Image (cartoon, rainbow, N blue to C red):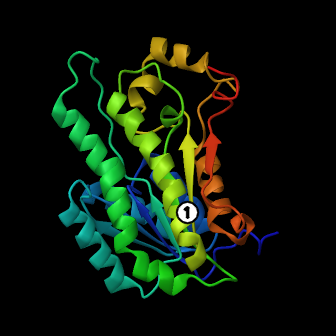
């Protein structure tokens, strides 16, 4: 069982890995034995995350801003300098924007779509040489895209660009999976529900909003870092070797209950 989920000898990159869901995923990948590169545009947060991760295993930080293609290309170049192969890519970096349907600004649409969809696509394609170098029929390379249940249902919040971007991530995952499967690269998505993060801080930390949110989650709580990280380990390990093009919902039962 330990070997089935082991990531020993494998190298992973987690974007937006200095906090929240990204840090939870990076932590479990390190604990499973992977060498983990994490990137963030916040140097101080990144240094703190690497310090924590390094207590569990091998971790390294790369400062990167993926909001524009120049940042994507710079990150791909930095990763290429550090490794000749990339076994696991976790596209987690993302942004959100809230505004009413009548007043949603173009900047809020473009910022979210550029980071959540365009940069995800171009980082994946920029790193294909490293993913191909790692991929074999016996041990395939993996790409894990972090979507959201907001890309599957209509959320309570006025965050239309975010929801649309996450729906696009789910479809892009299917497209990449179909194209890359013959090259022994598996592509899947995780659609989290409510987890502690900067994006969800308003929901988690505002008592009346938190109470309303808990009423939509059958398990009655937010997810833990280990639960999102464990899902990523499964998808990255031999245990997930026959799964591609899938979106794994990790939401405490919200979608299943039709809430």
Query: From the viewer's perspective, is residue 189 above or below residue 55?
Result: above
- Rendering coords of residue 205 (x, y %): 43, 24
Q: Label 1: few (<14), some or many (≥20) within 10 Å?
A: many
- At horizontal 23% and vertical 72% (from top left) the residue drawn is 74
Q: Quarter of the image containing the C terminus?
A: top right
Q: Quadrant of residue 141?
A: bottom right
- Choose between 236 and 258: the one closer to the eye: 258
- Rendering coords of residue 178 (x, y %): 56, 63
- Choose between 192 and 167: the one closer to the eye: 167
Q: Is residue 133 left or right of residue 64?
A: right
Q: Is residue 194 left or right of residue 160?
A: right
Q: Secondary structure at mark 1?
A: helix
Query: From the viewer's perspective, is residue 41 above or below residue 160?
Result: below
Residue 237 shows in this picture: yes
- At horizontal 35% and vertical 48% (from top left) the residue drawn is 116
Q: Quarter of the image containing the N terminus?
A: bottom right
Q: Residue furthest top?
A: 208
- Rendering coords of residue 245 (x, y %): 60, 57
Residue 198 shows in this picture: no
Q: Residue furthest right?
A: 1
- Rendering coords of residue 105 (x, y %): 18, 28
- At horizontal 59% and vertical 54% (from top left) the residue drawn is 229
- At horizontal 29% and vertical 32% (from top left) the residue drawn is 97
**Count of number-bearing discs:** 1
Q: Quadrant of residue 31?
A: bottom right
Residue wearing tag 1? 177
Q: Quadrant of residue 124?
A: bottom left
Query: From the viewer's perspective, is residue 5 above or below residue 9?
Result: above
């Amino acid at each position: 069982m330990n070997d089935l989920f082991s990531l020993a000898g494998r190298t992973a990159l987690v974007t937006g890995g200095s906090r929240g869901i990204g840090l939870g995923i990076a932590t479990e990948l390190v604990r499973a034995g992977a060498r983990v590169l994490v990137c963030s545009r916040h140097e101080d947060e990144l240094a703190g995350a690497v310090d924590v991760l390094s207590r569990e295993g091998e971790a390294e930080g790369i400062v990167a801003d993926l909001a524009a293609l120049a940042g994507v290309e710079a990150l791909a170049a930095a990763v290429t300098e550090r490794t000749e192969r990339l076994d696991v890519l976790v596209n987690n970096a993302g942004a959100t924007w809230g505004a009413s349907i009548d007043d949603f600004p173009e900047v809020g649409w473009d910022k979210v779509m550029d980071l959540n969809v365009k940069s995800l696509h171009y980082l994946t394609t920029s790193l294909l040489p490293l993913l191909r170098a790692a991929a074999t029929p016996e041990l395939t390379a993996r790409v894990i895209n972090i979507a959201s249940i907001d890309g599957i249902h209509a959320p309570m919040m006025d965050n239309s660009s975010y929801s649309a971007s996450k729906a696009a991530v789910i479809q892009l995952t299917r497209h990449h999976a179909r194209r890359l499967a013959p090259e022994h690269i598996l592509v899947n998505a995780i659609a989290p529900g409510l987890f502690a993060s900067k994006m969800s801080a308003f929901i988690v930390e505002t008592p009346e909003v938190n109470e309303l949110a808990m009423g939509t989650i059958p398990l009655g709580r937010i997810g833990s870092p280990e639960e999102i990280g464990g899902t990523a380990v499964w998808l990255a390990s031999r245990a997930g070797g026959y799964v591609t093009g899938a979106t794994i919902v990790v939401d405490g039962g919200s979608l299943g209950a039709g809430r």
